[in-house]
Every structure is written in C-alpha cells, then in structure tokens.
Amino acid sequence: MNDSNPPSQLLVRSRLGNPDGWLFDLDNTLYPAASNLFDQVDRRMGTYISNLLGISWDCARVLQKRYYRDHGSTLSGLMRHHGADPDAFLEYVHNIDLGAVGPSPVLAAALSRLPGRKFVFTNGSVGHAERVMGRLGVASYFEGIHDIKASAYQPKPESAAYHSVMTRFGLTARSLIMVDDIPINLEPASALGLTTVWVRHDGWADYIAGDHIDYVTDNLAGWLAQIVFD
C-alpha cells in the first residue's frame, strides 16, 4: 500500500502514470460520507423489506444486513429468496432527500484535469447516480454509468461485475484506476490488475488496508488534485 499515513497526512503527491480510464464508486465516494446520504438509503431498505415481507422493522434490518453479508447486496438476497422486483426496490430506496449534497467545484476541477475516460461504477441505480452527479455538478465529466442492472444484478464485489463494466466500455485493467469507499470492493479490482484507491471514512475506521489497496485518502478531490501524471 502506498499511502499508509494518518488521514490528515494522506494528501501526498502520487504518480499514476497516464491512465486510460477511471471507475468511480458513487455513494460515500464522489460525495463525503459525512453527508449521511447513504444512511437514508440504508433505512429505506429496512422499510422496504418490512413492507414486502410483513415483518417488523427490526427483523427486516437483521435480514437486510444478512443478505448484504451473504450475497454482496441486500437486493441480491431479496431477489434470490423472495423474488423481489429489482426496479421497484431501487426506485423506493433511492427516493431520498439529496439536500445534503450540493455543487462541488473542487471535485469538478479535479475531475476535469484527469487523463482518460471516466465512469461511475455503482451497486445503485442509474437514476440515483444521475441525480447525485447533477447535485454535485460533475455529470459532464463522466462518459457513462454502470449500475447494478447493467451488471445483471451481480454486485460488487462479485468478479462478474468488474468483467461486465470493462467489457461494456472496452477498458483494459492494466491502465485502469478504481476508486471506492468499501475496501473489499477493491479486492477483485486489484486481482484483475487495476490500480486501486480507497476513500476512507468512519464506517471502515477499524479496517486495516492490505496489499489490494494501492492508495488511501480521506479527501478524494484533494487527492485527485495533487496527482502527478507522466
């Protein structure tokens, strides 16, 4: 791992060659986790399961976390065990208040100088990604969005999702950089030969980064702005 200093010292000048492409996660990556936007999604998942199965919200939350742990996403578990409608699920859980996320000119400026093609690679939906990117003011810097539907509902960290996005957009692993806030999502990327960047936040405060993580930052826009390209 290249950057192992405390969070306040993570903005180091890094050399990344001249990458051909970037895969950016959406939630808690393009916007700060401190906005608590994904907390709304998380809670609405519990409510959806409660309504779908006619169980208490507390029981639904236990099931929600079990499916996430066992299947990589709550949706995958619901589809497999209960035949849930994925479109209905995604529409419901992403019907949230985006007021905590606003324009990010610093992120926009950082993205504008990056060489290579840029894509959002998310376990969420295209609609949710478009709304968040619109709020941030960064949509114009991305060539496409690869969501859970485009991955045939096989979520990160399933290896099929990574092959799917690379095949769809004609990307080559050796010249591709992936950025994600969930460190286990970077394991398959590293195994395929991608350069990996972990956007660390309190939700993974106790996680010790392994060799599958090349760079760590708690400030994505600041880190991107300080990269030196060959």
Image (cartoon, rainbow, N blue to C red):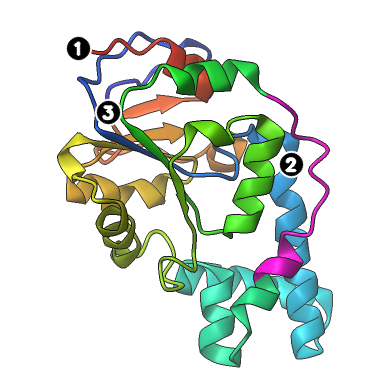
Which of the two labelled residues, at mark 2 and mark 3, occupies the earlier sequence position?
A: 3
Magenta residues (range)? 90-103
State how far apart marks 2 and 3 are (Cα). Answer: 28 Å
Q: Residue at x 31, y 58 (%)?
A: 168
Question: In the figure, is residue 176 to the left or right of 117?
Answer: left
Which of the two labelled residues, at mark 1 and mark 2, occupies the earlier sequence position?
A: 2
Q: Which mark is residue 36?
A: 2
Give coordinates of residue 7: x percent, y percent.
51, 19
Amino acid type at image mark 2 = Asn
Nearest the camera: 207 or 137? Answer: 137
Which of the two labelled residues, at mark 3 and mark 1, occupies the earlier sequence position?
A: 3
Q: Is residue 215 above or below residue 222?
A: below
Amino acid type at image mark 1 = Asp
Question: In the figure, is residue 39 to the left or right of 7?
Answer: right
Residue for badge 1: 230
Is 96 covered by the magenta stretch?
yes
Q: Quadrant of residue 177?
A: top left
